[in-house]
């Protein structure tokens, strides 16, 4: 019975931690970049390409960006602190994607800069 209660207590704590949607500042791994999986880096590069396309409608832009964003989660194999740091990066990224006004070059530049900052923290 104690194992059963402990299991559900741990499950609840995990769910709360995974559902925390507050992005925290990114940190390096003792001064070094975190190792990311290839699928994540590919999706970030694809997003940089999408942001640079001048003639996408807002719907097309959102669809393409969200497809790449979802692929990161689908193909994620990262664990531990690297995974937590990626989670922090992705929470802020999702907010920027959702708030982007397609006609705003300032918003696109900010999103581009943020996507490029991925390479400051991950390799």
Image (tube, grey):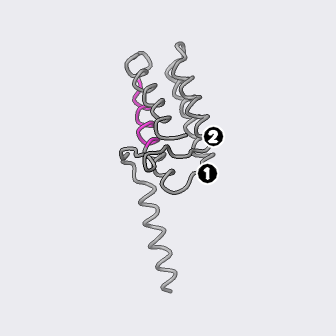
Q: Furthest-top residue in view?
A: 55
Residue name at image x 55 percent, y 55 percent: 79
Q: Is the magenta stretch mostly helix, strand or loop?
A: helix
Q: Residue 39 carries which label?
A: 2
Which quadrant: the C terminus? Answer: top right
As rendered, which of 105 and 121 lies closer to the eye?
121
Q: Are marks 1 and 2 in contact (CB under 8 Å)?
A: yes
Name the residue beneath numbered marker 1: 77
Residue name at image x 48 percent, y 68 percent: 11
Q: Calculate the distance from the C-alpha at mark 1 to the C-alpha at mark 2.
A: 9 Å
Q: Position of residue 44 (x, y in %)?
A: 55, 33
- In the shown orientation, is residue 45 left or right of residue 85? right
11 inside magenta stretch: no
98 inside magenta stretch: yes
Magenta segment:
89-100
Q: Where is residue 107 in the image (x, y as percent from the top left)?
A: 39, 22
As rendered, which of 116 and 11 lies closer to the eye?
116
Q: Where is residue 18 in the image (x, y as percent from the top left)?
A: 46, 56
Q: Furthest-front residue in view?
A: 31
């Amino acid at each position: 019975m104690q194992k059963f209660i402990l299991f559900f207590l741990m499950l609840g704590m995990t769910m709360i931690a995974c559902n925390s949607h507050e992005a925290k500042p990114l940190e390096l791994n003792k001064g070094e970049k975190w190792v990311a999986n290839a699928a994540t880096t590919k999706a970030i590069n694809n997003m940089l390409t999408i942001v640079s396309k001048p003639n996408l409608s807002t719907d097309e832009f959102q669809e393409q960006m969200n497809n790449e964003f979802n692929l990161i989660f689908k193909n994620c194999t990262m664990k531990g602190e690297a995974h937590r740091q990626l989670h922090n990066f992705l929470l802020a990224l999702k907010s920027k994607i959702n708030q982007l006004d397609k006609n705003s070059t300032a918003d696109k530049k900010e999103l581009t800069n943020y996507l490029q900052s991925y390479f400051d923290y991950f390799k």
